[in-house]
Amino acid sequence: MTGTFVLGSRTVKRLGYGAMQLAGPGVFGPPKDHDAALAVLREAVAAGVNHIDTSDFYGPHVTNRLIREALHPYPDDLVIVTKIGARRGQDASWIPAFSRDELRQAVHDNLRNLGLDVLDVVNLRAIFSVHGPAEGSIEAPLTVLADLQQQGLVRHIGLSNVTPTQLAEGRRLCEIVCVQNHYNLAHRADDAMIDGLARDGIAYVPYFPLGGFSPLQSSILSDVAQRVGTTPMKVALAWLLRRAPNILLIPGTSSVAHLRQNLSAAELDLPDDALTALDGA
């Protein structure tokens, strides 16, 4: 059901894995169970996942080092996508990190902690507001990232947490291969953006596909899940896979059992009446 989609110069399966939840509480500090974190990563790849999303500000430095420990040397088909544009305070706060030096340091930190010579895809995360996308020019930081691409340290560039205006600005400056924004069954502000990117063959990667720190709650979702005999979360993932062909999913978990449940959403075929009900949620 899921198929594949092009991400930069690579073809990936549409159901991937997001590593954020492997860090400690609040995406800060080490995991509570180091071996369990490694097991999740290894199980994901063994199950056929070839797209892993991470960042060196998860932890910080925690998830990238776990990925390297669990999977290096990496399978030839594995695409690791990271993001830059923030750093963590000692109090676990999220702080914009847009200066030339901070962006360059972030790319080099990702390379070192992942054990790579070049990063497949780097998303520039625009943090102008802690409450989601906010307007502001991304030309200066994106130009720095494009320079690092010219140096051969980055293959492809994506954007995260951006508005339509910022996406248009970014596409004028360099090739953008993916957009990673907040989107799920209940949070659908990017409907028009997704359709436009699909027409242009550009991947859209929803973060918080299952609601994030507050799991999705919807009576329609629960009703559909009960009708097809599965969990609401599995239905939410299956709906996203049907929403548009360019959507790549990166649901995160720190549990092997939960990982297997998420991946099984690829096999869930939702009937048309269920899709109609969910589309109207």
Image (cartoon, grey):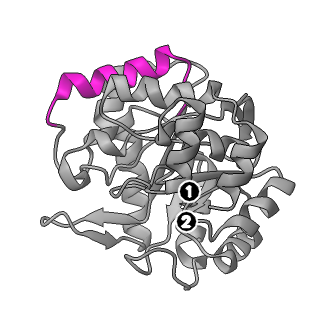
Q: Quadrant of residue 34?
A: top left
Callout 2 secondary element: loop
Query: Within the magenta stretch, is there residue 49?
Result: yes
Is residue 2 placed above or below 60 in the rendered structure? above
Q: Residue at x 36, y 65 (%)?
A: 86
Kindly identify the residue that appears in the image at 29 percent across and 38 percent down: 22
**What residue is shown at x 54% (from left), y 29% (from top)?**
229
Question: Taking 235 as reference, is 273 left or right?
Answer: right
Question: Camera-side residue: 34 or 89?
Answer: 34
Q: Which mark is residue 254?
A: none
- Among the 4 quarters of the image, the one containing residue 90: bottom left
Q: Is residue 9 visible?
A: no
Left or right of 130, for residue 266: right
Quadrant for the C terminus in the image: bottom right
Q: Which residue is mark 1?
A: 184
Residue 74, given in percent of the width and then of the height, sits at 47, 21
Percent x, y for residue 200? Answer: 84, 56
Dominant secondary structure, magenta:
helix
Identify the amino acid type marked 2: His
Q: Which residues are magenta?
A: 32-51
CB atoms at circles 2 and 1 under 8 Å apart? yes
Q: Element under label 1?
A: loop
Q: Is residue 200 left or right of residue 134?
A: right
Q: Which mark is residue 187?
A: 2
